[in-house]
Image (cartoon, rainbow, N blue to C red):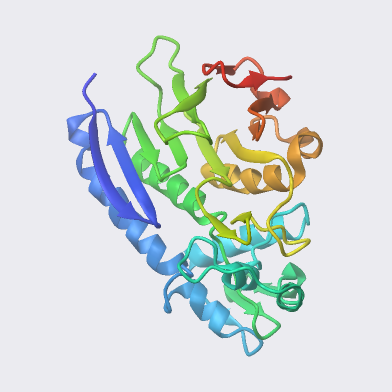
């Protein structure tokens, strides 16, 4: 079956959008325009955006925002208040370390502890009637980098569904969202799970799933080398330092991409056993944990849907 793919650059990564019918080809550019608009609204890597207007007003006043911004901020705050490891107010810590940027550095413990005082999600006031957000302490900053790509991917899928795109792939760089049934007789898709030790094209295993989201995050793409140590970019809001465990990568399979983004953070913070406990009420969400010794663990919800294809990895449950 023919397919039509366009490649773009946005959200700090390479984006590949694919449809399988020539009549759907115009919706690739339309999706890209949507990405550009959402990035303009939600980015914290520019001086001006709706999200930055909230940050600039911290400790001063509430800021009214668009429905787009309010919806994603509200979702991020709700998850943050559960205190399981995801924190939308982590911006001051991210900016302090700035891992992945040219001015990244290892801060002092005193600096870390000062920033820790500014990342309490309970200090975020939401007003549903006004669609306003108020960060109560001066210096607080929202950072939705751990959720925005998922929100945008879901918006593209909604856009394509509304225009009757029957089949497609949304690839936002480590974040894949499938649209419609595959061309296989069982209508399921076969999707490779990226190996955290090799190039992006290398897979450690294969998923056999419906048109779900596949979100992968890891410590191998953005890190800081200093003093003989590697510091990765996944910060623990409970310590202010990079998460300390033996994980190198977490892949989440879920119906919606924003759900996958959230659970990739929760998976890193909580590791396998606690994540299984947290998943008790999430029947459609499954995670794959990859460790430094190449051992792989899969949550119960993915049993039978994933298999190892690279024999240098070992499935241990």
Q: Where 103 falls versus 241 (above or below)?
A: below
Q: Where does residue 244 sit, x and y in percent of width and height?
A: 73, 50
Q: Quadrant of the N terminus?
A: top left
Q: Residue 271 vs residue 148: left or right?
A: right
Which residue reaches farthest top? 185
Residue at 24% x, 28% y is: 3
Left or right of 313: which side holds 80?
right
Estimate the x, y position of residue 103 in percent, counting from the top left.
49, 71
Please state which of residues 245 and 304 is positioned toward the viewer in this rendering.
Answer: 245
Q: Is residue 60 above or below residue 238?
A: below
**For residue 69, side relative to residue 181 (left or right):** right
Q: Position of residue 212 (x, y in %)?
A: 51, 32
Residue 228 or residue 13, whichever sits in front: 228
Q: Is residue 64 visible?
A: yes
Q: Residue at x 47, y 74 (%)?
A: 50
Q: Height in image: 119 above or below 38?
A: below
Assign the C terminus to one quadrant of the image: top right
Q: How many marks?
A: 0
Residue 49: x %, y % from top left? 43, 74
């Amino acid at each position: 079956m023919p397919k039509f793919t366009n490649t773009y650059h946005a959200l700090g990564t390479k984006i590949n959008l694919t449809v399988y019918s020539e009549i759907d080809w115009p919706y690739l550019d339309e999706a890209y325009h949507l990405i550009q608009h959402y990035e303009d609204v939600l980015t914290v890597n520019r001086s001006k955006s709706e999200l930055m207007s909230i940050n600039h007003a911290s400790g001063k006043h509430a800021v009214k925002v668009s429905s787009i911004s309010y919806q994603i901020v509200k979702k991020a705050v709700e998850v943050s208040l559960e205190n399981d490891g995801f924190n939308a107010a982590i911006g001051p810590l991210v900016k302090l370390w700035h891992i992945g940027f040219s001015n990244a550095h290892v801060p002092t413990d005193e600096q870390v502890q000062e920033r820790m005082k500014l990342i309490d999600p309970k200090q975020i006031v939401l007003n549903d009637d006004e669609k306003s957000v108020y960060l109560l302490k001066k210096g607080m900053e929202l950072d939705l980098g751990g959720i925005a790509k998922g929100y945008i991917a879901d918006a593209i899928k909604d856009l394509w569904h509304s225009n009757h795109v029957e089949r497609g792939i949304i690839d936002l760089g480590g974040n894949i969202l499938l649209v419609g049934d595959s061309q296989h007789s069982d209508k399921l898709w076969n999707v490779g799970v990226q190996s955290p030790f090799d190039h992006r094209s290398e897979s450690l295993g294969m998923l056999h799933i419906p048109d779900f989201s596949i979100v992968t995050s890891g410590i191998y793409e953005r890190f800081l080398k200093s003093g003989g140590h590697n510091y990765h970019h996944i910060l623990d809001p409970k310590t202010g330092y990079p998460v300390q465990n033996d994980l190198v990568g977490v892949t989440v399979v879920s119906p919606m991409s924003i759900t996958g983004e959230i659970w990739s953070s929760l998976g890193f913070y909580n590791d396998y056993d606690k994540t299984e406990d947290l998943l008790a009420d999430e029947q459609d969400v499954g995670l794959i944990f990859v460790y430094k010794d190449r051992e792989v663990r899969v949550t119960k919800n993915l049993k039978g849907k994933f298999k190892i294809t690279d024999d240098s990895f070992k499935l241990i449950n």
